[in-house]
Amino acid sequence: MPSSTISRRLFVFDFDWTLIEADSDHWVIQQLGGDLVKNQEDLFGKMQWTDLQDMLLGQLFDRGVTKQDLENTLRQVPMMPEVIAALRLMKAQGAELCIISDANTFYIDTILKASSHRANAFSRPFFCFAYEIDQLFSKVITNPGQFDEQGRLHVSRFHGLDLEPHGCANPCQPNLCKGRELQKLIDAQSWDQIVYMGDSTNDFCPSTHLRPHDIVLARAELLLEKAIKAQPELIKANVTYWKSAQDVLQACNGIFNISSSKPILSTTATTRVSYSQLV
């Protein structure tokens, strides 16, 4: 479908190792957990992942780790400026952006707010943005993360134990079928094109829900690429592999038919961009 005929685009993103350069669950335990890192490794595959993270967060709380400690740690998670530029370009072009992630609401919200602050400090005074990064996304579908009255963070399954299993035949986690949640977005309204970006096995299911004129942006050399190449007959969409944040920005420019020579949303602070180009 020619880009000129596309008016309604939906971009859907995984979070860990896609929008950020880390796994947020591992990051917190590695930075704050000490010997809990080994506990996480030993219990991997023996406990459901979300339940395991909730247990480890309880152990962190028992050791005196506070909400402020968690926030300070999450604020250090790297989010590449090229990815931020690509997100702002998508929004500026009128696309709708959503996240479907196996992380949790507290982690995602904290990281996005911190990344927005760093990006604005880096860009000022050369850029004027209409949206903070956390405001770019119309919906974030992920596991709930909430603090109790004592200040302990609880993470629970998006698809709870009180519900019937989602029964997906693809390799989805029991707490979240990303394909089912993507299909809800697809059914909610008509989209001219959908772009899904991810890296892992649980990003394979949503990729199978896309149409021939849609796009999968799969991180190269990781599990999503392996899954796609193992069952290519299940993927109807066009697949583009990326390795770096610069690849993501270039792919985004290509989707919108923007020449790489144009300075729209350049990540270098030496390029002046007018406000009208960004809103």
Image (cartoon, rainbow, N blue to C red):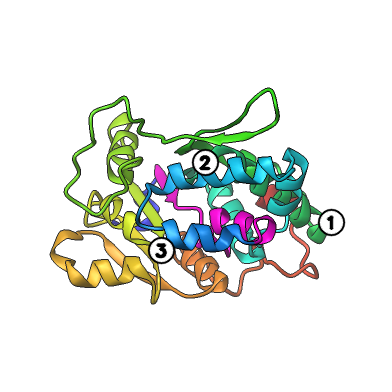
Q: Is residue 175 magenta?
A: no
Eyeballing the image, is 246 above or below 185?
Answer: below
* Residue in the picture at 42% in, 36% down: 157
Query: Toward the viewer: 231 or 119?
Result: 231
Left or right placement of residue 123 versus residue 262 in this view:
right
The residue under label 2 is: 54
Name, please, the residue furthest toward the left.
233
Q: Where does the C terminus fall, quadrant-wise?
A: top right
Query: Toward the viewer: 182 or 146?
Result: 146
Tags 3 and 2 in contact by the CB under 8 Å rule?
Answer: no
Name, please, the residue furthest toward the right.
125
What is the C-alpha distance between the residues marked 3 and 2? 24 Å
Q: Secondary structure at mark 1?
A: loop
The residue under label 3 is: 199
The residue under label 1 is: 124
Instruction: Please state which amino acid type lies under the numbered disc 1.
Output: Arg
In the image, the segment drawn in magenta is 8-34
Instruction: Please state which amino acid type lies under the numbered disc 3.
Output: Asp
